[in-house]
Image (cartoon, rainbow, N blue to C red):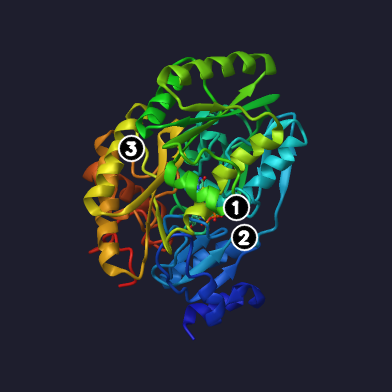
Amino acid sequence: MSHWLEDLKKAIPEERILTSLADRHSYSFDASFGEYLPEAVVQAKEKEEVVAVFKLANRYRVPVYPRGSGTCLSGGPLPVHGGIVLDMSQWPKKIDHRPDDLTVTVTPSVLTARINEEAEKHGLMYAPDPSSAHVATIGGNLAENSGGPRGLKYGVTKDHVIGLEVITPEGEVMRTGGGTIKNVTGYDLTKLIVGSEGTLGVIVEATLKLMPKPPAVQTMMVAFDHVRKAGEAISKTLTSGILPSKMEFMDQACIVAVENFKPVGLPVHAAAVVILELDGHPETLKVERKLVEEIMERIGAKEVIIPKTEEEAENIWHARKQVSPAIAKIKPTKVSEDATVPRSKIPDFMDRLQEIKEKFDVEVVAFGHAGDGNLHPNVLCDKRNKEEMKRVELAVEEMFKAAIELGGTLSGEHGIGTMKAPFMELELGEVGVDMMKRLKDAWDPNHIMNPGKIFVEKGQRLVLTDE
Ligand SMILES: Cc1cc2nc3c(=O)[nH]c(=O)nc-3n(C[C@H](O)[C@H](O)[C@H](O)COP(=O)(O)OP(=O)(O)OC[C@H]3O[C@@H](n4cnc5c(N)ncnc54)[C@H](O)[C@@H]3O)c2cc1C
């Protein structure tokens, strides 16, 4: 037995240390690519345990990989260099509401959807709404700076965090921010931790901002006979003075996939649909709905569908949520990307995706939070077909380049992890990446905290097969 494992067993109750092959296998993957076996898993339940893990990890130079529910799409929790997976999903779940302050303090293992459910009991809402909110932890959301459809109007996770309690890679307990909405004391370490993908510390508590729940919502679905027109509709709506809470896009392949999976009556002959939600006072919504209808007609929409009941509206949003599982049925492997472009460039990005699809002869479907420029091009393929996967790798690389050339970014919400590390310099340049590395060195001098993520390692490139 390794020395460090013996010491670990002295510091943590033995029933929370998993070392059997079967247990380690179940922590070897996330929702992206690649499989890496950890040497041990610690199901942490107390701060002292996390501190003990880090003290030991620094002493023996053992890598530590924090993990929530493992739904990451970029390889964030994967133990690429073995070591310890620090499972935070078993941490005691606490949701402490302060409705008068419009804040809530939560522990990292709480599932994100639960925070909103609790907030609604006080007439409030927790705005970030990733599609995985029912299965992903708030700890994972904070580490990835996750977003969802409501990000268009309300922003992403980082816009709703006011304070954190973090255990640093050297095993110190640190508080950042606090309980106030305004706070400019010193550097904003809260924002640095949020989105750091578990490379700068383990989040053990977070204080989040809540907002009043809008009194009414209006869903609309607009069908187009050209994908480009759908892109124009998004830009025209957003520059008209109306800010919908959600504006989602699905291309025809996604529409058909959903109808084959769980039919809800989507317009299968449309080249694309835009699903949008307006929220606010019921009287305002009547006016805004009419204005959106006029914009869509002017652009030449094929059809504007207004649900007659709440149930019909829910079905439309449910259909949008079904896209991911529905397209997963088309081919065995799905490479999900989340390159994001400035909103005015959405039509150009859609054209570029079409060119890439033809150039590399790959199957690409697109859906996503188009209102904030965050499209999810998904390449559908078969991991066992090595020749096809080489073309997929080239196509994905070209998608990243296209997004950056259009003034966009590698990732709108899924993070860099292992999947996009080789492309960081494309977006940030040498100096930008170097500054991030220097920050990382200061926080984690022995590089024990989630190594192999964000920063490219020697010889690392995008590989989507098991070679
Ligand atoms: C079907 C599906 C739909 C999805 N939809 C969306 C979406 O709409 N929007 C979106 O943004 N993402 C989406 N995702 C991606 C994923 O759900 C998010 O990235 C989510 O935040 C991951 O949370 P998790 O609990 O699963 O964390 P994990 O996947 O376990 O870990 C994610 C990262 O967080 C780190 N981490 C976990 N807990 C902590 C902690 N306590 N402290 C420090 N670091 C920690 C890990 O090291 C890792 O780097 C989707 C994924 C799937 C499979």
Type of the residue with mark 3: Met
Residue 392 location in percent, x, y? 29, 57
> Which residue position is annotated with label 3?
350
Per the model, the C-alpha gap separating discs 2 and 3 is 38 Å
Q: Is residue 277 or residue 200 the one in the foreground?
A: 277
> Which residue position is annotated with label 1?
137
* Residue 303 makes an appearance in the image: yes
Q: Report crowding for label 1: few under 14, some 14 to 19, many 20 or more residues within 10 A (C-alpha).
A: many
Total residue callouts: 3
Task: Please say if 66 is above or below 131.
Answer: below
Per the model, the C-alpha gap separating discs 3 and 1 is 32 Å
The tag earlier along the polypeptide, 2 or 3, is 2
> Which residue position is annotated with label 2?
89
The tag earlier along the polypeptide, 3 or 1, is 1
Q: Are marks 2 and 3 in contact (CB under 8 Å)?
A: no
- From the image, state whether disc 3 or disc 1 is nearer to you: 3
> Quick one: which residue is furthest to the front in this view?
269
Q: Are marks 1 and 2 in contact (CB under 8 Å)?
A: yes
> Quick one: which residue is furthest to the right in this view?
121
Residue 344 location in percent, x, y? 35, 26
The tag earlier along the polypeptide, 1 or 2, is 2
Q: Quadrant of the C terminus?
A: bottom left
Q: Determine the residue positioned at 51% across, 27% down.
A: 303
* Residue at disc 1, secondary structure: loop
